Image (cartoon, rainbow, N blue to C red):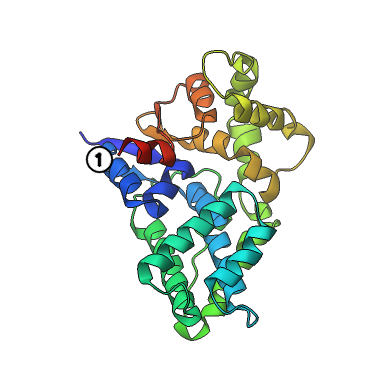
Amino acid sequence: MKEKHFLDTSVLRPILTSHPKVKKYYKQTLQGDLYICNYVKMEFLRGIIKSAIEFYFLLAMPQYQNFSEALSIWTHKFQIREHKNIEIMIANLLSAKNCLDDKNKSLRAISDYIRRLIGKLDYGFKNPGNDGTYCVKGQIMWDYNPADQKIYFQKILENLKDNELHKKCKINHYLKYKHKSQLNDILKNGSNTDQFENPESFKKIVKEIKLLDEKMITCASCAKLGDLVISLLSNSDWTLEHTDYSFNFFCIILKKTHRIHPSDISIMAKE
């Protein structure tokens, strides 16, 4: 029987966007069926696609002549890891296409790349169809119209930035009621963090769990609970594949099979 691999966003990202050597590692390591759910799709859309589209619109502004000029503005505006990843991803793309100094070719290359990534989310992996969060942002389907490409991209951004869409999903019921006992187990056993390294991210999520009864979960606060939600979504007969350390704690407490993978840098260093 083929192994079933349930991909966290931290593994989905390098499979789709990292260096060929990193992609080769995952292709060799993950032998079997690869699954992602709508919630994981949402995280990838929010973390990668949203930033790539924002860079596309920045480069499209008339005052910037090429990638380098747009990148200088982007670099000063964003310092966090996710946006640095976009810089590297787009720079590698445009270098491969040999169009770093050609604005129009760069825009076409970025646009085509974004649409291919969205297509791979929908057709490149199996969807178990059991996402009890009913994440609206992960279900949204956008009809591409090549004549109105900027409108297409703008619609994606508007949906991903809409913090009111939580009213249409079931994340509050999923965490506060359906999995209340599991959350109690996490709170009960969450103080024992000595067995694994880097417990900081796990501790931050535990703090958020303690606040769940006091407020409604919105799209913004849901972003702080992603590793918890994905741990709960993982089926007992799947292997949850991840690079984030918090899953080490969640999966032990929830009795889920999991595997932590090395970072992209570590994989590259071994090649």
**The one of 128 and 211 positioned closer to us in this rendering:** 211
Q: Is residue 152 left or right of residue 16?
A: right
> Looking at the image, how many numbered discs can be counted on the residues?
1
| Residue at the extreme left of the image, as rendered | 1
| Residue at the extreme right of the image, as rendered | 214
Image height check: is 77 above or below 101? above
Image height check: is 179 above or below 77? above
The image quadrant of residue 165 is bottom right
Q: Position of residue 269 (x, y in %)?
A: 37, 37
Q: Is residue 163 left or right of residue 128?
A: right
Residue type, mark 1 in image: Gln
The image quadrant of residue 256 is top left
Q: Secondary structure at mark 1?
A: helix
Q: Is residue 12 left or right of residue 51?
A: left
Q: Is residue 138 visible?
A: no
**The one of 111 and 9 positioned closer to us in this rendering:** 111
Q: Position of residue 50 (x, y in %)?
A: 57, 61
Q: Is residue 114 visible?
A: yes
Q: Position of residue 57 (x, y in %)?
A: 59, 73
**In this figure, which residue is indicated by the disc labeled 1?**
28
Instruction: Determine the residue positioned at 65% across, 44% down.
Output: 222
Q: Which quadrant is the C terminus positioned in?
A: top left
Image height check: is 180 above or below 58? above
Q: Is residue 74 left or right of residue 265?
A: right
Instruction: Determine the residue positioned at 39% across, 26% down.
Output: 257
Instruction: Determine the residue positioned at 48% across, 37% down.
Output: 233
Q: Which quadrant is the N terminus positioned in?
A: top left
**The one of 123 and 184 positioned closer to us in this rendering:** 123
